[in-house]
Image: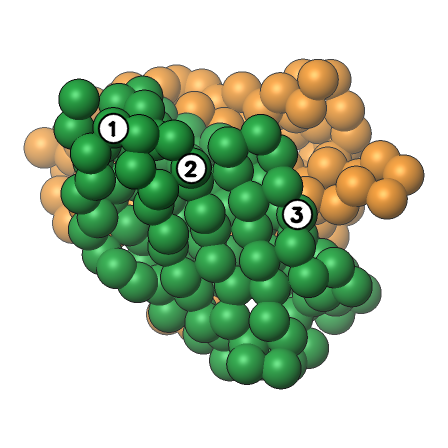
């Protein structure tokens, strides 16, 4: 099955700096890559996603890049703010016809933004 | 839109009892829902995939007789933890697959904190 590795496990930055979280996946059939933000005790919130037919996607301060050949994708947060502090999870999914959209999650990254 | 609710948010029960957790998609129909378990400071571990009107598909290592899943309607899936024991204490989260046009993603419920005494 799919395996997703996420790095780093913890990331500490100063407010205003950029943060980058990287994930690799094992199954080249995976074609959907969402990123979720989870605050303590809360539900994971979808913040951005990308499909395999696109190399990059941006939404204000958040961007995701995908390298299908290398089987890795990254989350970029610019101009970080204290409220960006949370746990971030990457995930990968194979085509729904084979998996019903089942997601395999990375291990998570604890992002701390210091004021 | 795309709101998923989960009930109860917290439950404390005695060892040996059963607990039912409900997951509802409030403003969309979800033919597929997923159940996850999350330990403190860890990632989400998929337990099972629940498809409306059919038997759930369990991940390897998850006991189907212990974690009963029912998906009787397009907006409701339930997870019953049978004969709960302290090691079943965890944060259980459901998600619902949202399909609309070219959008195919998952939205999560707020989770249920289960504590078994």
Q: Position of residue A25 (x, y in %)?
A: 50, 73
Above or below B104: residue A21: below
Local crowd size for mark 2, using a 10 Å CA cut-off: few (<14), some (14–19), many (≥20): some
Please identify the residue farthest to the right as the structure is shown: B101
Q: Residue at x 74, y 59 (%)?
A: A54
Q: Which residue is mark 3?
A: A57
- Mark 1 or mark 3, which is nearer the start of the sequence? 1
Q: Chain of mark 3?
A: A
**Element at badge 2?**
loop
Instruction: Please tell me which residue lies in front, B49 or B84.
Output: B49
Disc 3, SS: strand
- Camera-nearest label, 3 or 1: 1
Residue for badge 1: A15
Q: CA distance from mark 3 to mark 2?
A: 14 Å
> Residue at label 2?
A78
Disc 3 and disc 2 on one polypeptide chain = yes
Spatial CA span between label 3 and label 1: 23 Å
* Tag 3 near tag 2, CB within 8 Å: no
Apparent colour of chain A: green
């Amino acid at each position: 099955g799919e395996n997703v590795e996420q790095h780093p496990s913890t990331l500490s930055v100063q407010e205003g700096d950029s943060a980058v979280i990287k994930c690799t996946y094992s199954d080249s059939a995976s074609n959907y890559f969402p990123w979720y933000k989870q605050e303590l005790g809360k539900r994971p919130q979808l913040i951005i996603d990308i499909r395999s037919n696109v190399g990059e996607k941006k939404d204000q301060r958040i961007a995701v890049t995908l390298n299908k050949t290398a089987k890795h994708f990254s989350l970029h947060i610019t101009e970080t703010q204290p409220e960006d502090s949370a746990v971030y999870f990457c995930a990968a999914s194979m085509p729904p016809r084979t998996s019903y959209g089942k997601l395999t999650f990375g291990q998570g990254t604890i992002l701390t933004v210091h004021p | 839109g795309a709101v998923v609710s989960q009930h109860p948010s917290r439950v404390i029960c005695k060892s040996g009892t059963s607990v039912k957790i409900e997951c509802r998609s409030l403003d969309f129909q979800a033919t597929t829902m997923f159940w996850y378990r999350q330990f403190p400071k860890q990632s989400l571990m998929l337990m099972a995939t629940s498809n409306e009107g059919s038997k759930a598909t369990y991940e390897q290592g998850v006991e189907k007789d212990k974690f009963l899943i029912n998906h009787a309607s397009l907006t409701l899936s339930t997870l019953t933890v049978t004969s709960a024991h302290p090691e079943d204490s965890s944060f259980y989260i459901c998600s619902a697959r949202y399909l609309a046009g070219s959008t195919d993603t998952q939205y999560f419920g707020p989770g249920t904190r289960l504590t078994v005494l």
